[in-house]
Image (tube, helix red, strand yellow):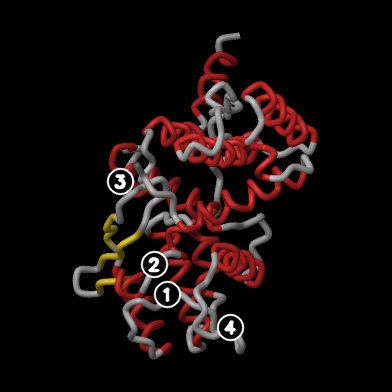
Amino acid sequence: MTKPSEHTQRVYRTDIINFLRDLDLSLGKFLTCDRYQAFELVSRYMGQMSTKNLSPSTINRRISAIKSLVTYAYNCGKCEYVLDNVKSLAIEPYRDTSGVSLAQFKQILAAIDETSLKGKRDRAILLLLWGNALRRSELAGCNIADFDPDSKTLRIKGKGRSQHEIVSLGTSARAAIQYWLIARGEINPTSALFCSVNPGYKDGRLCTQAIADIVISRSKAAGVNKKMSPHRIRHSSITAALDATNGNVREVQKLSRHKNVQTLLVYDDNRTNAQAKVTNILDGLI
């Protein structure tokens, strides 16, 4: 059985607390329901979330947290039901896979003061997000020991993976990480690869939100007005990789680490705008 990451455990814990709070339930009362009462409660909660205009992926994650809790309690003999009959909402595939252009990303990098400690850190983070299309949770979980400058690799815990995996780094990213670590002066292999440099929080591991804040603030400082996030940079690098490989989704899948190649086909369709091409052909026939 795959053990959820610390980030997933933390999110699930919050989801369960919110569920009990929103329905004014105690955990004991919920687990001692019969299966019909439990189904009614969870269904009602799904309805409440829908009226708040939460995304299907957020609703599904929260329901998954509740189902995981119930399954664990059932296996431990603490409740008499499971929630297999509660179905997830259908999720449409990615629609907006747009990011920023290479020129805009270079603009963001160029605006960073590389002489400062914070600048060295942020440049290394941005280069990893771009060159390896990393998710912010993957980056936040890395320790110094996960970085191997000799082999130009980084060990990460991928989304939904039970084991660590090794990704190869570009020359620029490797150099940026080395400059950051030398300037930081930390050699403890169990320390976070990326940490805070602010007084009072110095050396504290950067959380996923802190990484998102860095992307947002650096983009704004560079004059990039588009709404930015670490995932937006991931979109950008995947699209740029498809451009550079002439749409070779199999090669780019090695970069993005998507389990389903169909996801990359959505990126490729959006990149080439195949629909517009076919529409123009039909338009020309009239």
Task: Name the foreground residue: 216 vs 100.
Answer: 216
**Three-letter code, disc 2:** Cys
Task: Name the foreground residue: 50 vs 281.
Answer: 50
The residue carrying pointer 2 sits among few (fewer than 14), some (14 to 19) or many (20 or more) residues within 10 Å by Cα, namely: many
Give the secondary structure at mark 2: loop
Identify the mark nearer the N-term, 3 or 4. Answer: 4
Q: Quadrant of the N terminus?
A: top left
Give the Cα distance between marks 1 and 4: 13 Å
Circle number at residue 192 = 1
The relative height of residue 91 versus residue 4 in the rendered view (above or below) is: above
Task: Name the foreground residue: 41 vs 61.
Answer: 41
Q: Which residue is mark 4?
A: 201
Identify the mark nearer the N-term, 4 or 2. Answer: 2
- Can you give x and y, in whole percent of width and height, for residue 226 in the image? 66, 55
**Three-letter code, disc 1:** Ala
Q: Which residue is mark 2?
A: 142
The relative height of residue 100 versus residue 149 in the rendered view (above or below) is: above
Give the secondary structure at mark 4: loop
Please state if 230 lies on the left or on the right of 249 as rendered. right
Q: Which residue is mark 3?
A: 254
* Residue 101 visible in the current orientation: no
- Can you give x and y, in whole percent of width and height, for residue 107 in the image? 54, 68
Task: Name the foreground residue: 25 vs 67.
Answer: 25
Give the Cα distance between marks 3 and 4: 36 Å
Give the secondary structure at mark 3: helix
The residue carrying pointer 4 sits among few (fewer than 14), some (14 to 19) or many (20 or more) residues within 10 Å by Cα, namely: few
Please state if 212 lies on the left or on the right of 30 as rendered. left
Please state if 171 lies on the left or on the right of 33 as rendered. left
Give the Cα distance between marks 3 and 1: 26 Å
The residue carrying pointer 1 sits among few (fewer than 14), some (14 to 19) or many (20 or more) residues within 10 Å by Cα, namely: many
Q: Nearer the viewer, mark 3 or mark 4?
A: 4
Give yes or no for contact between labels 1 and 2 (Cβ–Cβ under 8 Å).
yes
